[in-house]
Image (cartoon, rainbow, N blue to C red):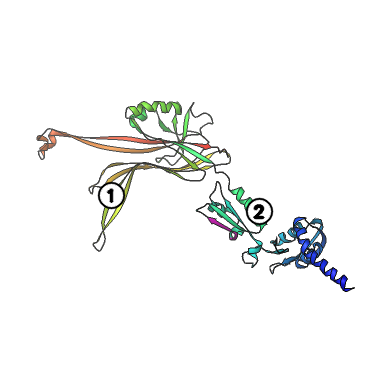
C-alpha cells in the first residue's frame, strides 16, 4: 500500500471517530449483532466497532450476556445490555459513551448521575421519602423546610423514583366533624324522654326522621348499648331548645373541625388558670413550680376513611369544671372523660353518653342567736342536703369532604 493510500486511510479513520459520534447521538445509528454468553466488555467493544462510536466502560462493569440485536438504535442496544446489570450509560461531550454503575461508591458516579428536584403537593416530602423503597434511600435527600425531595442517580432510576413519588403524592381525603356537647339535668332527661336501653343496629336511612338509635360508649357499662330517642334527631334538637332556655340543659360547645384522613385534630374550649405550687425537698429547700389547670371541653379526634366510604373515628372527649377549692386554695376539678373508637357511615351521628356527675349541696336554717347556742342550739336549726345529677351527651357527626382535585 502506497504512503498516500495509508495516509488517506488514517485520515478517514480519524474523521470517522469525530463524525460518527455526532451521528450516533443525533441521527440514531442502527446496530445489529448476536451475543451468546459473551463477556459484557467484549460485547461493548464489538458494539463500538459496529457503530463506530467509542464506548468506554469503567471498572464496575462485568458479567456475561446473551442477546441479539437487529437494526435497533445504538442507545437502545446499550440500554438492553446495561439495565439488567444495574448499569447506566451517558453520552459525554467529548464524543464517547461512558458505561458504569450509578452507585454513590463508584468514582464515575458524578459523571453518570443526574439530579431531579421534586416538590410534593399533597403529602410531606418526609413522608414520601419514608414510603419509598429502602433501595432508593441513598439517592434521595429531603428538605423539610422547602418540602422538597432531591434525587441523584441514573436516568432510569430517576424515572422509576419519579413514578413512585407520583403514586404516593396523592390528595388526602378530609373529614369535617360536627360536635354538639350537651349537659342535661334530671328534669331535662325526664322531659325529653331519653333513657338507656339495649338496642340493635341502626338501619340505614335519613337520620333526621324515624327512630333514632345512636351507637354509644358509656362509662357505666362494658357492653355496647344505644341511646334511643324514638322521635328522631331533628325532634330531639327542637325539644332541647326550651330546655336550654329554662336552664335545664346547657350546650357546652358546638364546634366544627376539619381533619385529614389519619391525622389527629384537637379542640379545647374553656379556661386555663396557672398556679404556683411550692414543694419542700428532703433537704428542706423550697421549689416552685407553675401548674396550669384547664376547665372546659376537650375533644381529641382521629378519623380514618375506609375504601368503602365508612369513617372510623377514635375520639377522646373530656368535660371538666372547677367545683371548689381545697384548704390550700387550689381548685378542685371535676372531670368526665371517655375514650372509644367507632365506625359509622358518612353523615351518620354517634353519641357518647353516660358521663354522669352527681352534686351534693347542704343548707342550714336556724333561728338567730338561739341556733348558735352549744348543745341545745341543734333544736333551733335545721340542715338539708340536696343532691342533683347531670349527664353530658356528646353528639358527633363525621362528613367526608370529597376532593375536587
Q: What element carries label 2?
A: helix
- Give the crowd class for mark 1: few <14, some 14-19, many >=20 residues within 10 Å: some
Q: Quadrant of residue 26?
A: bottom right
> Is 364 left or right of 1, judged from the image as shown?
left
Q: For the N terminus, which image quadrant?
A: bottom right
For the image, the number of numbered tags is 2
In the displayed structure, 238 sits above or below 318; it is: above
Q: Quadrant of residue 282?
A: bottom left
Residue 151 in sight in this render: yes
In the displayed structure, 172 sits above or below 71; it is: above
Residue picked out by circle 1: 275
User: Residue shown at 58%/52% (left/top)?
Assistant: 118
In the displayed structure, 147 sits above or below 324; it is: below
Nearer mark to the viewer, of 2 and 1: 2
Is 139 magenta? The answer is yes
What is the C-alpha distance between the residues marked 2 and 1? 59 Å
Q: Where is residue 276 in the image (x, y as percent from the top left)?
A: 27, 52
> Is 160 left or right of 404, judged from the image as shown?
right
Residue picked out by circle 2: 159
**Residue 21 disc label:** none
Q: Position of residue 27 (x, y in %)?
A: 77, 55
> Is 70 left or right of 388, judged from the image as shown?
right
133 and 229: which is toward the camera: 133
Q: Position of residue 186 (x, y in %)?
A: 33, 31
Q: What element carries label 1?
A: strand
78 and 136: which is toward the camera: 78
First-in-chain label (2 vs 1):
2
Range covered by the magenta-colored residues: 138-144
Residue 77 in sight in this render: no
Q: Where is residue 323 in the image (x, y as percent from the top left)?
A: 28, 41
Q: For the C terminus, which image quadrant?
A: top right
- Give the crowd class for mark 2: few <14, some 14-19, many >=20 residues within 10 Å: few
Amino acid at each position: 500500500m502506497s504512503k498516500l493510500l495509508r495516509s488517506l486511510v488514517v485520515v478517514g479513520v480519524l474523521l470517522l471517530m469525530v463524525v460518527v459520534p455526532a451521528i450516533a447521538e443525533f441521527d440514531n445509528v442502527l446496530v445489529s449483532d448476536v451475543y451468546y454468553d459473551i463477556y459484557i466488555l467484549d460485547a461493548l467493544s464489538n458494539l463500538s466497532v459496529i457503530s463506530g462510536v467509542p464506548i468506554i466502560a469503567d471498572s464496575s462493569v462485568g458479567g456475561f450476556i446473551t442477546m441479539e440485536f437487529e437494526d435497533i438504535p445504538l442507545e437502545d442496544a446499550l440500554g438492553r445490555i446495561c439495565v439488567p446489570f444495574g448499569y447506566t450509560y451517558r453520552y459525554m461531550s467529548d464524543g464517547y459513551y461512558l458505561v458504569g454503575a450509578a452507585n454513590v461508591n463508584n468514582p464515575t458516579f458524578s459523571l453518570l448521575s443526574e439530579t431531579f428536584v421534586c416538590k410534593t403537593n399533597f403529602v410531606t416530602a418526609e413522608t414520601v421519602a419514608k414510603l419509598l423503597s429502602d433501595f432508593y434511600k441513598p439517592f434521595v435527600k429531603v428538605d423539610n423546610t422547602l418540602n422538597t425531595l432531591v434525587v441523584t442517580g441514573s436516568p432510569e432510576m430517576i424515572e422509576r423514583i419519579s413514578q413512585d413519588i407520583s403514586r404516593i403524592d396523592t390528595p388526602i381525603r378530609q373529614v369535617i366533624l360536627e360536635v354538639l356537647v350537651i349537659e342535661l339535668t334530671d328534669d331535662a332527661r325526664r322531659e325529653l324522654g331519653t333513657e338507656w336501653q339495649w338496642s340493635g343496629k341502626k338501619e340505614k336511612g335519613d337520620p333526621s326522621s324515624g327512630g333514632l338509635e345512636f351507637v354509644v360508649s358509656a362509662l357505666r357499662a362494658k357492653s355496647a348499648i344505644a341511646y334511643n330517642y324514638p322521635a328522631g334527631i331533628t325532634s330531639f334538637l327542637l325539644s332541647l331548645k326550651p330546655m336550654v332556655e329554662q336552664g335545664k340543659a346547657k350546650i357546652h360547645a358546638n364546634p366544627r373541625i376539619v381533619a385529614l384522613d389519619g391525622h389527629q385534630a384537637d379542640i379545647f374550649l374553656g379556661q386555663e388558670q396557672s398556679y404556683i405550687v411550692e414543694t419542700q425537698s428532703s433537704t428542706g429547700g423550697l421549689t416552685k413550680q407553675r401548674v396550669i389547670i384547664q376547665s372546659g371541653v376537650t375533644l381529641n379526634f382521629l378519623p380514618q376513611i375506609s375504601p368503602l366510604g365508612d369513617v372510623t373515628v377514635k375520639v377522646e372527649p373530656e368535660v371538666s369544671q372547677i367545683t371548689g377549692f381545697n384548704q390550700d386554695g387550689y381548685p378542685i376539678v371535676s372531670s368526665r372523660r371517655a375514650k372509644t373508637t367507632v365506625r359509622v357511615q358518612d353523615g351518620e351521628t354517634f353519641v357518647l353518653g353516660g358521663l354522669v356527675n352527681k352534686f351534693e349541696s347542704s343548707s342550714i336554717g336556724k333561728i338567730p342567736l338561739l341556733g348558735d347556742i352549744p348543745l341545745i342550739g341543734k333544736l333551733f336549726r335545721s340542715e338539708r342536703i340536696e343532691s342533683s345529677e347531670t349527664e353530658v351527651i356528646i353528639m358527633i357527626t363525621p362528613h367526608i369532604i370529597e376532593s375536587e382535585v
